[in-house]
Image: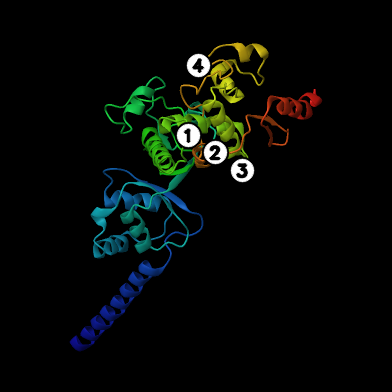
Amino acid sequence: MVFKIIVCLLLALIIGSDWLWRDYQRALHQPAVMGNSVIIEINKGDSFNQITDKLLTLNVKFKPLWFKVIAIQEKSISKLKTGEYELVSGLTLPEILAIFVQGKTRQYAITFPEGWTFKEVLHAIDSNPNLEHTLSNNDFGVLMSQFGTAASAPILPPEGMFFPDTYFFEKHTSDVALLKRAYDKMQVVLNQEWSNKAEGLPFKTSYEALILASIVEKETAVVAERPLIAGVFIRRLQTDMLLQTDPTVIYGMGENYQGNIGYNDLKTATPYNTYVIRGLPPTPIAMPGRDAIYAVLHPDLGNSLYFVARGDGTHQFSATLKDHNVAVDSFQRKKK
């Protein structure tokens, strides 16, 4: 009788051990996330049990015991990083733990197109619900002072100082941290291009080149034309001609610009009206991309001093005022 009981107990132990082993193997290898992806946020101070509860609330299929056993085996319980995570269908428990340990947080994107003003950048940032909003509209001097400028250098206005690009970030990234990345990238690109600039350019600093690049950026979206337009403006600077470029007038008009420039607008003095002031305006008027920066540092070496829009996105270039007037008659006045 005792022997039979021992045999039964041994059989039960063997069967139970086999079931536990199979159940453990299922926990290791079977998908815990099925169907749609789930979004989980691990907050600072969350315990392992709290993270487990969040996963269960999101209908992730697993047994908490095995989740903890696997975490103990992989020594990951204290290594789970805070952040928002997207768990896609098919992930197993070890894969979920690896994502948490490696901090592979969910990434969001924000795009600053070439030619945008700082005002447009701020609007995009303010409208993005995934960023932490800390900026004050009146704090831009303080903002720029945080970006690593040498103590002896003047604090420049923010216009044009951020590189146009698509930036990826995790939830709760601060607006200032995002702008710092865009600022740093502009510094890298500008310094790279400035170090390889052509000879004989009328710029004392890379900031002056950035100002002209912003004008070229606003004048044309045709990459091949940018060195030609840059060449026109540089020859005008070198011969003390007025730049006479409409985008600077529009920028100087601010909220008064309603889609058209009138004769009085061209004659109204603002720091940015290049029909009135000589030389460059005091700051960039938008964010130039690398192509526009490269163009002003490697301008076309022709003799054009004028250009006029053809109406198809391209421009007609002329070396003399006489030829320019003919081009204006051909491409502009005939339309009126």
Instruction: Locate the N terminus by quadrant.
Output: bottom left
- Name the N-terminal-most of marks 1 and 3: 1
Residue on which disc 1 sits: 201
Is any part of residue 229 visible from this angle?
Answer: yes
Q: What residue type is labelled 2?
A: Pro
Colour setting: rainbow
* Quarter of the view holding residue 168: top left
Whether tag 1 and tag 2 are in contact, CB under 8 A, the answer is yes
Q: In whole angstroms, how far apart are the C-alphas of marks 1 and 2?
A: 9 Å
Q: Dot 3: what SS?
A: helix
* Residue 224 numbered tag: 3
Expressed as whole percent of the image width and height from the top left, the position of residue 67 reads 31, 61
Q: What residue type is labelled 4?
A: Pro
Q: In whole angstroms, how far apart are the C-alphas of marks 2 and 4?
A: 25 Å
Q: In whole angstroms, how far apart are the C-alphas of marks 1 and 3?
A: 20 Å
Question: Number of labelled discs?
Answer: 4
Expressed as whole percent of the image width and height from the top left, the position of residue 292 reads 53, 38
- Name the N-terminal-most of marks 2 and 3: 3
- Name the N-terminal-most of marks 1 and 4: 1
Residue on which disc 4 sits: 271
Q: In whole angstroms, how far apart are the C-alphas of marks 2 and 3?
A: 11 Å
In this image, 191 relative to 238: left or right? left
Residue displayed at 41% across by 24% down: 157
Q: What residue type is labelled 1?
A: Leu
User: Mark 1, mark 4: which one is toward the viewer?
Assistant: 1
